[in-house]
Image (cartoon, rainbow, N blue to C red):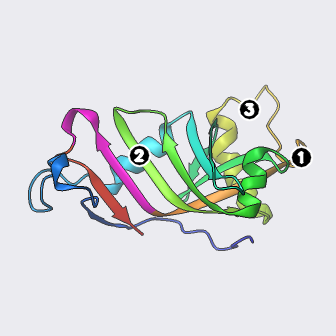
Amino acid sequence: MADETVPTSCSPVAGRPNVPQSYGLAPATQGEILPWSWAEERLRDSRNYWVVTVRPDGRPHAMPVWGAWVDGAFYFGTGIDSRKGRNIAADPRAVVHLESGDEVVVLEGVMEEVTDPEGIRRFEEGFNPKYGFEGDSEEMDMAEMGAVVYRMSPQVAFGWTEANFPQNATRWVF
């Protein structure tokens, strides 16, 4: 289910999340709408990400992973027989969340297996230096490890800072 075209930039439409009025969310004309560049910086710089998938019986499954934000998409690798891998094979819908609750970025979208060599190369270029797998140390080769690389181009994303919630709660639609 690989999509060989990867967006090189994202230009989502920003607005407010759909939340109950009791949250005290500022109208779109008040407060601060965060720029997508704010979210991309955090996605690029994060070390750990939470990936949430759905088991075949509907129960959620959340696990921390290492990954890379490359060309407007989130990439990570996992074993094809891992719970994440089996869940994605059955239902590719997923959520990716940064580990920070103070500077929140949440992505919703569909995972796609990356099979094209260029896509895998771009992932490894973002991943290997970030986690110290280059230079004098061995590079991590997902294929050698029997791992599958997945890419999520977000459909919807959410972001806010704890210090300014709910005034800067932002929803981006792609």
Q: In the image, what residue type sits under mark 2?
A: Val
Q: Earlier in the sequence, mark 2 or mark 3?
A: 2
* Residue corresponding to mark 1: 146
Horizontal side of 56 relative to 174 (left or right) equals: right
Taking the view exactly as shown, the residue that stands out farthest to the top is 136
Magenta stretch contains residue 164: yes
- In percent of width and height, residue 76 lies at 67, 47
Q: Which quadrant of the view contains residue 134?
A: top right
Where 56 sits versus 49, above or below?
below
Q: Give residue 120's mark.
A: none
Task: For marks 3 and 1, give the one nearer the viewer.
Answer: 1
> In the image, what residue occupies the spot 41% across and 46% down?
105
- In percent of width and height, residue 111 lies at 64, 61
Range covered by the magenta-colored residues: 156-165
Look at the image and tell me in which quarter the N terminus lies: bottom right
> In the image, what residue occupies the spot 85% across and 48% down?
81
* Residue corresponding to mark 3: 133
Where 55 sits versus 12, above or below?
above
Q: In the image, what residue type sits under mark 1?
A: Gly
- In percent of width and height, residue 109 lies at 54, 62
Horizontal side of 61 relative to 22 (left or right) equals: right
Taking the view exactly as shown, the residue that stands out farthest to the left is 30
The residue closer to the viewer here, 9 or 28, is 28
Q: Earlier in the sequence, mark 3 or mark 1?
A: 3
Q: Earlier in the sequence, mark 2 or mark 1?
A: 2
The residue closer to the viewer here, 41 or 103, is 103
Where 30 sits versus 43, above or below?
below
Task: For marks 2 and 3, give the one nearer the viewer.
Answer: 2
Q: Give residue 105's mark.
A: 2
Q: In the image, what residue type sits under mark 3?
A: Phe
